[in-house]
């Protein structure tokens, strides 16, 4: 079920299917979120929980027992409940079910608050361990922004610009969707800017960074300065993706707390990089903020 949000000149649409914010328009009618056209990719703004990326051979162990889970977890394909709402915000809630317990053996509450701001929106993730033992999890955003935003523009007219200059190398994926331990490719050397080019995604699929100085990045038109800024403070990783080999007109900006398995992992959930562990009754709050850049 979809619900509309409004604040000033901004409007948004949120959906209980996946708990997503699936549309954001400014006063001029510009849409910022990808439409989910299946000719390129049917996703729009999925929530990644309780894993990010792929598991090694699709399996993970908890307390010696093996569980199976699809890439990016089950939240993105789950129906959330709207448990609180106002004109400019909504809170979606997801809890464990018999089906989730077969894949992830922990009771939990995942709350997602989408809040319109004067110049964008904020998404707040709150995860609470409602069980009686330590609970490991990973979580991430996967927001697909339209790129280009304007008529007559091209994907290659845009840059990704970090808040600070970086010396950054991307993790590299194996054909099985795992990261290769110890292998990276340098993308930034004393620079804050990645010029967008479909060719790099055709070759590498995803750009994935950790250990950055920056806590934010802009998707920005090179001439007009128009675009979005994403603040990912609190997330130790950020990834960028667009469907390779089809020249897709969007780019995903993905703050992650956790990531795909590494090819040399032994398969235990708690060895996943940047995995969060919550004691019984404990909660973790993370948020990302999107600010519109008008140039």
Image (spheres, grey):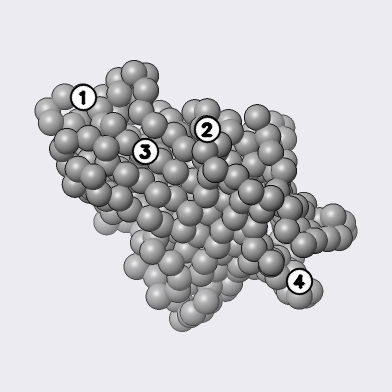
Mark 2, residue position: 81
Dot 1 or dot 2, earlier in sequence: 1
What crowding class fits label 4: few (fewer than 14 Cα within 10 Å), some (14-19), or many (20 or more)? few
Q: Which residue is denoted by mark 1 in the rendering?
A: 66
Front one among 160 and 13 = 13
Is residue 102 in sight in this rendering? yes
Q: Image check: 185 left or right of 198?
A: left
The residue beneath circle 4 is 294
Q: Nearer the viewer, mark 3 or mark 4?
A: 3
Mark 1 to mark 3 CA distance (whole Å):
23 Å
* Structural distance between the alpha carbons of marks 4 and 1: 49 Å
Residue 57 visible in this rendered orientation of the protein: no
Residue sitting at x 52%, y 76%: 163
- The numbered mark, 4 or 1, whose residue comes first in the sequence reads 1
Q: Disc 1 or disc 3, which is closer to the eye? A: 3
N-terminal of the pair, mark 3 or mark 4, is 3
Question: What is the number of callouts on the image?
Answer: 4
| Position of residue 142 measured from the top left corner of the image (x, y, whole percent) | 53, 47
């Amino acid at each position: 079920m979809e619900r509309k949000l409004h604040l000033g000149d901004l409007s948004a649409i949120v959906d209980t299917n996946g708990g997503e914010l699936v549309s954001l328009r400014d006063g001029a009618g510009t849409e910022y979120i990808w439409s989910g056209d299946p000719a390129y990719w049917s996703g729009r703004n999925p929530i990644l929980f309780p894993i990010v990326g792929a598991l090694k051979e699709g399996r993970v162990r908890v307390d010696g027992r093996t569980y199976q889970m699809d890439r990016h977890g089950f939240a993105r394909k789950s129906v959330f409940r709207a448990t609180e709402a106002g004109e400019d915000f909504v809170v979606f809630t997801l809890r464990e079910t018999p089906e989730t317990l077969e894949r992830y053996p922990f009771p939990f509450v995942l709350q997602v608050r989408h809040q319109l701001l004067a110049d964008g929106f904020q998404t707040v993730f709150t995860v609470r361990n409602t069980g009686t033992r330590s609970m490991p999890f990973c979580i991430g955003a996967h927001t697909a922004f339209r790129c280009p935003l304007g008529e007559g523009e091209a994907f290659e007219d845009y840059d990704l610009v970090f808040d600070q200059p970086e010396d950054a190398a991307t993790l590299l994926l194996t054909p099985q969707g795992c990261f290769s331990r110890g292998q990276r490719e340098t993308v930034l050397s004393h620079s804050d800017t990645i010029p967008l080019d479909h060719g790099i995604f055709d070759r590498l699929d995803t750009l994935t960074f950790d250990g950055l100085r920056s806590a934010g990045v802009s998707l920005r038109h090179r001439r007009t300065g128009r675009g979005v800024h994403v603040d990912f403070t609190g997330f130790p990783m950020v990834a960028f993706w667009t469907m390779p080999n089809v020249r897709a007109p969007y780019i995903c900006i993905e703050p992650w707390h956790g990531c795909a398995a590494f090819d040399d992992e032994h398969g235990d959930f708690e060895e996943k990089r940047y995995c969060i562990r919550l004691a019984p009754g404990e909660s973790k709050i993370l948020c990302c903020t999107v600010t519109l850049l008008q140039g």
